[in-house]
Amino acid sequence: MRFLTLLLLAAVHVAHADLVWEKTVQEFHRVPEDGHVSAKFAFKNSGPDTVTIKRVKTSCGCTTARLAKNTFAPGESGEIEVKFTFGGRRGPQRKIIAVTSDRPRVVSASPEEQREWTLDLRVYIHEPLTLTPALVWWKVGDAPEAKLVKLTTADGQKVGVKGVTSSNPKLSAKLATVAEGREYVLSVQPTDTFAKEAAELTVTTDFPPDAPRSYRIYARIK
């Protein structure tokens, strides 16, 4: 009986989870101009023994993974920093990072109790908001009539436009909502057209949530 108890205790010890991940899946929305995205996959050694990460392998050459150190004492935390470079890639992208430790594999263990883990980086590269046109202009002496800029979101996206500011008080803009999160209209108007003027209009949004983006529209009197 005592021998059986010792065997059971040993089995429990081997099967005890070591690396517990804060998140194994992360999702980002970016535009092509961003060029890359970085994500940090945090973990903690929750087991009773020191754990050494022996290998971190990414699914393609466009993705790199950096680990500041490889060995973690019980209770110690760490993170793997993953960087995905877009290149010419567009649309939905999925990059897999395989992490292997020196812990023995346990056949009956749950995924978080095994020595191999799969990290999943999902990136959507698109232009979530289109501004048409991106430049409005008048000739000196034209009637100071308002010109419209249409703001529309990409299919399947919802972008909240929070406001618009102008760098020149002589060229102002008003925002109107056509369909919340889907379509907006900017009305850009000069106070007069007596002389040449220029302005940069900044449109602020709430998307993507982790790094809200601003857009630029240019207005000219020439």
Image (cartoon, rainbow, N blue to C red):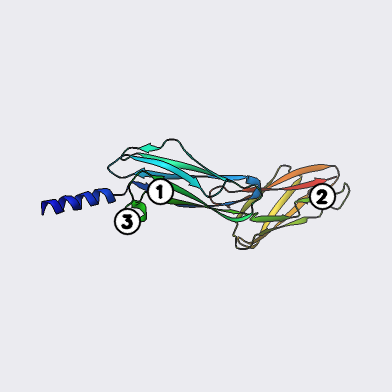
Q: Which numbered disc, 1 or 3, marks the residue that appears first in the sequence? A: 1
Q: Which amino acid, mark 1?
A: Glu
Foreground pick, 222 / 55 = 55
Give residue 20's position: percent from left, percent from top: 36, 48
Q: Which numbered disc, 3 or 2, marks the residue that appears first in the sequence? A: 3
Q: Residue at x 31, y 53 (%)?
A: 106
Residue 158 in the image: above or below residue 75 = below
Give the label, 3 or 2, closer to the camera: 3
Q: Which residue is mark 1?
A: 22
Q: Secondary structure at mark 3?
A: loop
Q: Residue furthest right?
A: 141
Q: Which residue is mark 2?
A: 137
Judge left or right: residue 1 versus residue 93: left
Q: Which residue is mark 3?
A: 107
Give residue 147's position: percent from left, percent from top: 78, 55
Spatial distance from mark 2 to mark 1, Cα to Cα?
A: 51 Å
| Image quadrant where one finds the N terminus | bottom left
Q: Which amino acid, mark 2?
A: Trp
Q: Which amino acid, mark 3?
A: Val
Q: Residue furthest left?
A: 1
Q: Quadrant of residue 46?
A: top left
